[in-house]
Image (tube, rainbow, N blue to C red):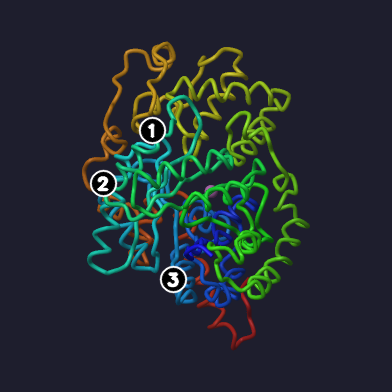
Amino acid sequence: MAEKKPIKITETILRDAHQSLIATRMPTDMMLPIIEKMDKVGYNSVECWGGATFDASLRFLKEDPWERLRKLREGFKNTKLQMLFRGQNILGYRPYADDVVYAFVEKSIANGMDVIRIFDCLNDLRNLQAAVDATNKIKVQEGRGESQIALSYTLGDAYTLDYWAKMAKDIEEMGADSICIKDMAGLLTPYKAEELVKTLKSNTKLPIQLHTHYTSGVASMTYLKAVEAGVDIIDCAMSPFALGTSQPATEVMVETFKGTEYDTGFDQNLLAEIADYFRPYREECIASGLLNPKVLGVNIKTLLYQVPGGMLSNMVSQLKEQGAEDKYQEVLEEIPRVRKDCGEPPLVTPSSQIVGTQAIFNVLMGERYKMATGEFKDLLRGNYGQTVKPMDQAVIDKVIPNEPRSTARSAEATGHTEPELESIENEMKQWKQQEEDVLSYALFPQVATDFFKYRMAQQEKVDLSVADTKNGAYPV
Ligand code: CO
């Protein structure tokens, strides 16, 4: 047998899997009872944090995401924790000054994070440098923390093998520890994956991780070819929250490579116990409607229109609100045209929403670019950074006539060049109970404030109930 080269696995059930299938609603209490077992599997890392998990924790679950991170850190004694980070936007929707990026990275690692996967929706690497530098700084100081830069994978004239190869070299030069191919829409087909992995491997010494979604139905075959081509790590989800718009199933990939040079050595009995734990929760989510069986099938439109699964469902609900569901097909066809007009960016948060919403406007108004969203204008102004291809001049002239356009990285294009953490802290002082609260507020000002109010009410209630227990009174 050939030399052993066990494929490494990042488990996504605590982040992307439930984000993709149940709108990121898995509460911490659902996670904690099983993490001791998960810690024994031998995962390369467990992905457990990101923009949506952070936002949904505060907004819907009324949980402190930092508290979740600390609890997971406590339970995962042997396994690295991993998060997804939107470059200069951190976990939010606007670019932040570098001091906020540094503070967020520092607090994430201090609270237990290990691997920070950083991406930019335009693949403008300048928007990733601050986060990489911040991670490297902490790594030197604390001996912990890894930066991984993700290529937002997409299709289009500009996205040749040479383009990806150059990016890989640039990423290595930026000082990242590894590279991820982030295929958020499930566009990467098996033989394309083989080609891409081989190309990256021959252009960089950095480990390559592959992240894809099952949306178009090819994902496990894609992993097979990618592993044979030398990819180092694959992202998988435990079977109860795998497939559909989520990742390939962990157990299936483990079984696939059993007895080969890529054998993970994972214990299927242990994996079965973990799956048994999550299965009733899956059933519960289906029964309550939180998990819509529609997202579990194969959606081949994602390949035809290169639209990520999450973007499709967003689009359907936006059209429903407008009473314009009959325009679905027209909007679907408009999306690639809008994408071309604005420099053919990858479609991932936030460019996916920006392009999708503009496509809806174009169709519903009956005239293209009769109206444009603020975000679309910002994209044309260069406020998100540079796109790989030039934008359409006629569209620029119509949407932002005679306006200056920036060629700087996003933080500079939007004027976030001076430190801003202190002024953010001043804004929210009255709610601050820990340093991390300042960062929660920085990312989601309104949502965090609502959470802080809720937290205060809970704390007061707890005090009251303790005091009143003697009298047999229980405040509601
Ligand atoms: Co994903």
Q: Closer to the camera, 237 or 84?
A: 237
From the viewer's perspective, tell me whether residue 455 is left or right of residue 314.
left
Q: Nearer the viewer, mark 2 or mark 1?
A: 1
Label 1 with label 3: CB-CB less than 8 Å: no
The residue that appears at 52% across and 14% down in the rendered structure is 370
Mark 1 or 3: the one toward you? 1
- Residue type for callout 1: Asp
Could you tell me how far apart the alpha carbons at marks 1 and 3 are, in whole angstroms? 41 Å
Q: CA distance from mark 2 to mark 3?
A: 32 Å
Residue at image mark 1:
162
Q: Give the residue at mark 3.
A: 70
Q: Ligand 1 closer than 8 Å to the CB at disc 3?
A: no
Q: Earlier in the sequence, mark 2 or mark 3?
A: 3
Question: Counting residues from the N terminus, which is met first, the one under dot 2 or under dot 1?
Answer: 1
Q: Amino acid at mark 3?
A: Arg
Residue under the image location 42 percent in, 52 percent down: 208
Q: Locate residue 49 relative to residue 386 in the image: left or right.
A: right
Residue underneath mark 2: 173
Image coordinates of residue 13 in percent, x first then y, are 58, 61
